[in-house]
Amino acid sequence: MSFGRTPQHSGRSSPISSGRATPVTRSIFRPESDGMAGGGSTMEELLSCERTFAQLKREGRHLEALPYMEMSVVLRRKMYGDDSKEVLRACQVFTTSCNTLAMNCLQKDEYAKAYELLKKAEVLTEARGYLQEEKTRLKLRAVTFNNLGCFYKRRGELPPAPP
């Protein structure tokens, strides 16, 4: 997992940032080998993601756990549909995790990581994004923009105006 880029679009696509409900070859957070190759069912893939995610979190490897959380959002969307509570809850957790980890990275002066995490949260909270429930989406979007403001302030840059 390489975050060595400056705050610009990485050029890589992820399931969430591309707006697709099916997994793509590589996410900006996705590990090189995620153990999900093969022809398993969507439910088997979801359970595998959940187990790996839980194990990595228990070990305190939060950044490494994030790709599995992202994939679980994509798989839930595929299984349950855009408007399901399953997808809403998973998106809330994922967006909150992106924001929390971004602030942790910012405290350690890991600006590229922080920026990518915040941009991921921004994409998730767009009006046509994964979060379909408006009140929740707007709340998380406000948190994300606040954190982007902290990011730019810390870097000594003026934040861009939101769209």
Image (tube, rainbow, N blue to C red):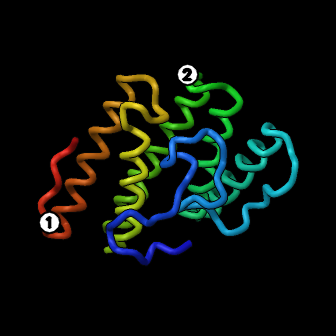
> Which residue is drawn at the image coordinates 44% and 35% (left, top)?
129
Q: Give the number of callouts.
A: 2
* Residue 30 horizontal/vertical position (percent): 61, 61
Q: Position of residue 108 (x, y in %)?
A: 35, 73
Q: Mark number for residue 157?
A: 1
Q: Quadrant of the N terminus?
A: bottom right
106 vs 59, nearest the viewer: 106
Q: Earlier in the sequence, mark 2 or mark 1?
A: 2
| Secondary element at image label 1 | loop
Residue 83, numbered label? 2
Whether residue 139 can be seen here: yes
Q: Amino acid at mark 1?
A: Glu
Residue 147, image x and y in percent?
27, 52
Local crowd at mark 1 within 10 Å, few (<14), some, or many (≥20)? few
Query: In the rendered structure, which amino acid carries the disc numbered 2?
Result: Asp
Residue at 35 percent of width and 62 percent of height: 115
Identify the residue at horizontal 34%, vertical 59% (top origin). 103
Q: Quadrant of residue 96?
A: top left
Quarter placement of the C terminus: top left
Q: What's the distance in space between the residues labelled 2 and 1, CA to CA?
A: 38 Å
Does the CB distance between marks 2 and 1 fall below 8 Å? no
Report the side of 17 relative to 52 (left or right).
left
**Occupied quadrant, residue 83:** top right
How would you rate the neighbour count of disc 2 (Cα within 10 Å): few for under 14, some for 14-19, many for 20 or more?
Answer: few
Image side of residue 152 versus residue 105, left or right = left
